[in-house]
Amino acid sequence: MSSLVQKYNVAGPRYTSYPTVPYWEENSFTKSDWESSVIKSIKESNQKEGISLYIHLPFCEAMCTFCGCNKRITVNHNVELPYISNVLKEWSLYLALLDETPIISELHLGGGTPTFFSPENLQILIDGIFKNAHKAKNAALSYEGHPNNTTKEHLKTLFELGFNRVSYGVQDYNLEVQKAIHRVQPFENVLNATLNAREIGYTSVGHDLIYGLPFQKKEHVIHTIKQTIALKPDRIAFYSYAFVPWIKGNGQRGFSQDNLPSPDEKRAQYEIGKKMLEDAGYIEIGMDHFALASDELNIAMETKKLHRNFMGYSSSSTQAMIGLGVSSISDSWYGFSQNVKSITEYKKLLDQDQIPVYRGHLLNNEDLIIRKHILNLMCHFETQWEKNGELYFKEIPDILISLKEMEEDGLLILESNGISVTEKGRPFVRNICMAFDLRLKRKKPNTQLFSMTI
């Protein structure tokens, strides 16, 4: 495995979308085209499957230096209501495009720190969202909670509003690592937040862990996994740390690349963590995720209904996903768009009754085909096609040739009408997807755009 890590540890996308953001054709993208794609998508799918909604809540009281997300650091909670007002204004602009009332089947609050907001203000936000929208019968409402500030009142208020899932950012329990990433939180805080959620009635409690962090060692990962297993969360995200210091404003400072584990050390951290989780009854779901056998994610994987988008893996799939708030990314299936990242610019555009999109991409027929193959690989570790069928494209013979070496390395099995990833190849699924990424092949970057694949 060590030689394979060295061989395939290259910069590559995580494929929460295809095309990936650096390859969007922004020059040919217009807001009116984006709005038309939203109208088309919701008209086709709303009654059948509903829509997904992602709301970005960017505020944090302190900077976590492992984070690559768009956030604003402040201890001034007077920012809450004005921001909520802007999000609801953006939602009203989307509603004005539609001839029917949207049915929300999935809603996720991300950040930043959603629990930066008071329970009362979160209720104002959610009530405002559903004032002119229907909630699907089995809607999945979830949010990210900070174990240090998610109170019982947060949990109760959001549960009463229909939220049934919460995920807590744990990262690592070692104090040296926590200090390096500026995220000190005792195990007791995670314990209390987890028990409180279960007591109130949440059907899914998740923990997010990261390996490959600065100063992190294998024994730290073992300790963290042991503590996590003791709390038996329903889902566990076990992410590779994405070191992307070239992205402006991401706050990854206070340590250098020399403080990070080597690629081989990092892979060893993952392998021991994976074994411990599987020994405890967790099943690996796609890439970076684990769930108990009874969890909906595992059931979705077994029934080939697992989906992946900008919010991560999901047990349900909607054609349209609308992102609200600064920097949010939306997906109409036919196109992607991203909102402006500045709160000031966001408000300015909303005051002008404009949906605050600043860039995007409209998918062509080739994009749509490649997207389906990459989704199949990321969710099911296999993809197929029929010669001259819907998922066939002329570059497939060349792709099969390019994957021959990976087959020789035991990472996948090639067939004339498809490929399947082996158990050995699962850690390298991003590399396998890159073989299908025609945009990346046609225009290889001169500078590093992505985190390392291993």
Image: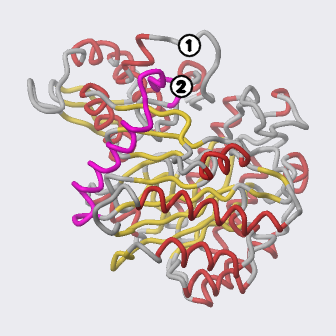
Nearest to the observer: residue 350 or residue 129: 350
Judged left or right of residue 399, residue 337 is right
Any magenta on residue 46?
yes
Judged left or right of residue 79, residue 141 is left
On residue 445, which mark appears? 1
Q: Are marks 2 and 1 in contact (CB under 8 Å)?
A: yes
**Residue 372 lies in quadrant:** top left
Quick one: SS at disc 2? helix
Any magenta on residue 74?
no
On residue 194, which mark appears? none
Q: Is residue 89 above or below residue 417?
A: below
Nearest to the observer: residue 290 or residue 116: 116
On residue 22, which mark appears? 2
**Residue 411 lies in quadrant:** top left
Label 1 crowding class (10 Å Cα cut-off): few <14, some 14-19, many 20+? few
Q: Residue at x 72, y 40 (%)?
A: 212
| Among numbered discs 2 and 1, the one appearing first in the sequence | 2
Judged left or right of residue 244, residue 239 is left
Q: Is residue 170 above or below residue 24?
A: below
